[in-house]
Image (tube, rainbow, N blue to C red):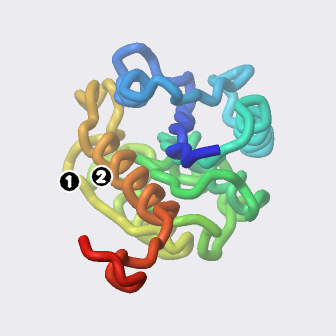
Amino acid sequence: MGYRAPRILIIPGLNDSGPAHWQTWLQAQYRDARRVTQRDPSKPELERWAERIQRTLEVAGDGEWLAVAHSFGALALVRYLADHPDSPIRESLLVAPAEPDKFGLAEALPHLRLPRRTRLIASSNDPWMSAASAARWAHRWGASFSNLGAVGHINTEAGFGPFPLAKAWVDAARQRAAAEHRPQHASFLEWGFAI
């Protein structure tokens, strides 16, 4: 079987991500994208949300994934990755994670480098997590960190419909995956063939 590009896994935060949210927009950009749907998206239950990520991947079948999580969904993804070091998720994007201390979950989350390449995007005036706290968690998790400035919680209420930065991250991650899977053929000259 030939190479298959990693699929996109959308992991919304509390109350899901509505039709105008950038996660819904991003999902529509990739026809093979999947969304993690919580039974009750208004109840932030870390273990249950992390298990739901696992079940969604099991149902979706084999293959690699790029996970894009927002707010409480980012915490669930981090917990899932810590619990499943052999996960088929090859890279993760955490956008505006919720502050674990707001939910009493700081000790339930890993304080070590995550087993997968991760990027954390925050803002300087996010009501759900300070930029300083986001930078600390990014450092603990070994994630690259970006602060977009005063852009709120990076959601619909903050004015985010389309979010080209998230799509650019997905496309770059897919390019990295393709480059890694490209066969390393010997050059024709090494075999004495003229080109």
Disc 2 target residue? 123
Looking at the image, the residue that sits furthest to the top is 19
Query: Relative to 49, is 95 on the left or the right?
Result: left
The spot of residue 42 in percent (x, y) is 63, 23
| Element under disc 2 | loop
* Disc 1 target residue: 149
Residue found at x 41% / y 47%: 96
How far across and down, in percent of the image, does residue 104 sit?
A: 68, 52
- Quadrant of residue 18 within the rendered picture: top left
Label 2: how many Cα within 10 Å (few below 14, some 14–19, many 20+): many
**Is residue 68 or residue 149 the one in the foreground?**
68
Q: Is residue 26 above or below residue 153?
A: above
Q: Dot 1 lies on which element?
A: loop
Q: Residue at x 23, y 28 (%)?
A: 159
Horizontal placement of 135 versus 13: left or right? Answer: left
**Residue 135 as seen in the image, left or right of residue 73:** left
Quarter of the image that includes the C terminus: bottom left
